[in-house]
Image: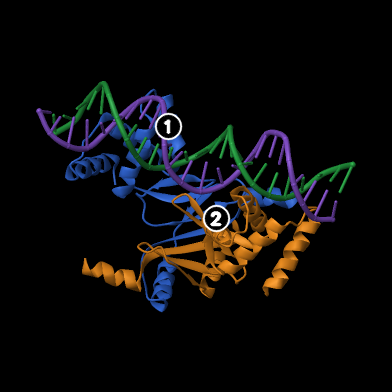
Chain colours: A blue, B orange, C purple, D green
Amino acid sequence: MKHADIKEQFREFIREKGLKNTVQREAILNEVLQTGGHFEIEDIVYQMRKKNIPVSRATIYRTLNLLKDMGLINEVIKIDNKTIYELALKHHHDHLICKSCKKIIEFTDEEIEKLQDKICKAHNFFPETHRLEIYGYCQECFQKRKKT
Amino acid sequence: MKHADIKEQFREFIREKGLKNTVQREAILNEVLQTGGHFEIEDIVYQMRKKNIPVSRATIYRTLNLLKDMGLINEVIKIDNKTIYELALKHHHDHLICKSCKKIIEFTDEEIEKLQDKICKAHNFFPETHRLEIYGYCQECFQKRKKT
DNA sequence: ATGGTTGCAAAATGTTTGCAATGGC
DNA sequence: GCCATTGCAAACATTTTGCAACCAT
């Protein structure tokens, strides 16, 4: 989906809920779209400070919660008590997380969905989503570790 | 493994590291063992208060970190910025998490391990562990939801 | 004009830490 | 006696919130 469409969708969401569109919200949405991938609050704060767009941290928090409600972003994981978000534009994928450099690599896999269904049926559970995180070392960090 | 063995293992770990065994640490380990499953810090605090075992929150935090280092407990997930731990006595398993009542159901599945290897090979990643969480609704909550 | 939004500072939450007193070894 | 550990309070970090001024509709 194109950024322009997403912005329209956001305005729509705002309208439906009887909320108001503001420059701050538009600006935050812009930044979020420009991350293109994973980000945390401070990334957004930093970018906006850098560009001299005045927005308070409180408003960023409030707006990210809005974007989460509307489904545009997801919480990926909390590392060190910090929330990491991601744009929810791509189809579902999971993550490989490097324990050394904290790099997050995305992947998709068909089989997981089937596996999920099988497991849930066996436990009378009604799945909506899943999250598979594989922890280990990326190639670079693995090689560095071998030397020590 | 029996609780007595685990306690011995803990004393061993303490000794190896040149640390000291204390009544507080033993008491906290006892509580952790008695949870039998998932717990968070406040559960331990509450149980110990109830039993009139005097320990400070700080010591519980410090001891849980010790237990984590020695591999007896794992962080499962952070919900509402609270850390949820689990005893690591059982062999590896994953979790079904009910979005409504927050119940955590455990399951094991062989195929996931194979899947993990396949995925990691494809991405030049060197896995150590994984975490698969399936979010949805348990049977009771699913039925309740249908009515609304 | 009404009622949602902002920024600020304060509060709330979960967790860590500095330090003096205490207690294992 | 040495040095780790404890408890306390203070410090920290992240996130939320109360409120007055503000602004979109």
> Quarter of the image holding residue B129?
bottom right
> Quarter of the image holding residue A4?
top left
Which of the two residues, A7 or B2, is positioned nearer the viewer here?
B2
Residue A14 location (% of width, % of height) = 22, 41
Q: Tell me if B14 is positioned left or right of B92 in this view.
A: right
Residue at image position (68%, 56%) is: B24
Kind of residue indicated by mark 1? Val
Question: From the viewer's perspective, is the residue at label 2 or at label 1 nearer?
Answer: 2
Residue at image position (33%, 72%) is: B140
Which disc number belongs to residue A45?
A: 1
Would you call the spot at circle 2 few (<14 residues within 10 Å), some (14-19), or many (20 or more)?
A: some
Whether D24 is drawn above or below C15: the answer is above
How many numbered callouts? 2
Residue B126 location (% of width, % of height) = 61, 58
Q: Which residue is tagged 2? A: B41
SS for dot 1: helix
